[in-house]
Image: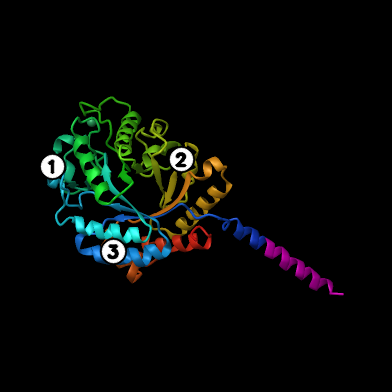
Amino acid sequence: MRPLAYTLTYFIIIIAGFTAAAQSSSLITSADELPIRGFCIAAPRSSEVDTFVKFIREELASRKVNTLILRVDYNYQYDSHPELRDSMPLSKNEVKKLVTVCKANNIRIIPQINLLGHQSWASTVHNLLRVYPQFDETPHVKMPEKYVWPNADGLYCKSYCPLHPEVHKVVFDLVDEICDVFEADAFHAGIDEVFYIGDDKCPRCGGHDKAELLANELRLIRDHLRQKERTLWIWGDRLLDGKTTGLGMWEASLNNTHRAIDMIPKDIMICDWHYERPDKTAVYFAMKGFKVVTCPWRNPGVAVIQAEDMMRFRRDATPALKENFQGMVQTEWSSAGSFMDGFYTKKKDSNGGDNTSWNTFRALYQRLKEMNAIK
Ligand SMILES: [Zn+2]
């Protein structure tokens, strides 16, 4: 007979083994791949295209990234509106290099132009409102020489007026052209952090319900894209109630736009960004009938929890809801060049730590692989 202590130890080991298995299986149960494994970054500058092609081939493809959101804005040689081009914008040939490498590696490109909000940054007005100042929602707000936040005007970024009769003709030309050249079946319109909407002083928008203004703008963009069977993607923050959730004015809305969530078509794809905490708002979007991806930035610990949450949401959902939990998109807010520099040199954050977007990208994709979310 075995001594009692031996037997007990044996059972404890078995129990410990079961517990460990149960814990890990609560994370790693995916029989199917996460539908969207994404990466979002500014489109490279013209001089960075070849390095970025190499990055796509070696770093995105090897991690089975299948969705690349490229923030293009005015960094393209638009034929429809040459007056809106940045200086040194991407040529058609350079875009086709990106399209080719992505096609070869089964990566879907989704180009982004910021519509509605983000028409300025700090004290710089971006191309649309610089060339067409009549589209400005708040022309009475003058750009400061030296930008500080907070400020008396509540100026974060300028918006275009969604009720201006000529604005959509211009921006839809850009949307169509950028989708055509990238051969895209989806377009990302930004729509994050829109603080100026329905301004009291706007002769068209003043007094309107801000949620209705947002919803109508989203429907207009969505309907335009649907004509060519394209899908609209947006950041989700304007659809979350910043007061009730405590999420505040940046990653949720304190300007009464959140009720738009019940006024817009359900086929709009939601990119739900939370950078400091793994907020569970993906469940809210999914239960409202939207497909949603969760988007981390520069905190690897938060990103790993968000990835585990996404897997649990899919595992525990009803079949009706499961496919609304579409996946994860790593976001990067600097230029493609500085991301690649940080990534290849393993640069530390400003405190000498590892809270960087490149480190988060590595950690997120490592965790997804461990959980069998990527085959
Ligand atoms: Zn207006």
Q: Main secondary structure of the magenta part?
A: helix
Classed neighbour count for the residue bearing mark 1: other residues with Cα under 10 Å, few (<14), some (14–19), many (≥20): few
- Find disc 1 in the rendering and name its residue: 131
- Highlighted range, magenta: 1-18
Left or right of 79? Residue 24 is right
Q: Position of residue 331 (x, y in %)?
A: 36, 54
Name the residue located 48 percent from the left edge and 59 percent from the top edge. Answer: 374
Residue under pointer 2: 285
Q: Amino acid at mark 1?
A: Val
Q: Earlier in the sequence, mark 2 or mark 1?
A: 1
Which circle's residue, 3 or 1, is located before the other in the chain? 3
Please give left or right for residue 20 compared with residue 126 in the image. Answer: right
- How far across and how far down the image is residue 148, in percent? 23, 48
- Residue lying at the far top of the rendered structure: 207
Q: Could you tell me if the residues under marks 2 and 3 are in contact, i.e. CB atoms within 8 Å?
A: no
Task: Please say if the residues under marks 3 and 1 sit with CB atoms less than 8 Å apart.
Answer: no
| Mark 2, other Cα within 10 Å: few <14 / some 14–19 / many ≥20 | many
- Is residue 119 visible in the rendered image? The answer is no
- Circle 1 sits in a helix, a strand or a loop, which is it? helix
**Residue at x-position 23% and y-position 64%:** 48
Split into quadrants, the picture shows ligand 1 in the one at top left
Q: Which callout, 2 or 3, points to the residue nearer the camera?
A: 3
Which disc number belongs to residue 52? 3
Classify 191 as above or below 21. above
Q: Considering the numbered disc 3 on the image, is that residue within a helix, a strand or a loop?
A: helix
- Tell which of 109 and 313 is nearer to you: 109
- Using the rendered view, name the quadrant where residue 1 is placed: bottom right
In the image, is residue 8 part of the stretch drawn in magenta? yes
Residue type at mark 3: give it: Phe
The amino acid marked with disc number 2 is Phe
Q: Measuring from the top left, give residue 299's x and y in whole percent.
A: 42, 58
Up-down: is 286 above or below 29?
A: above
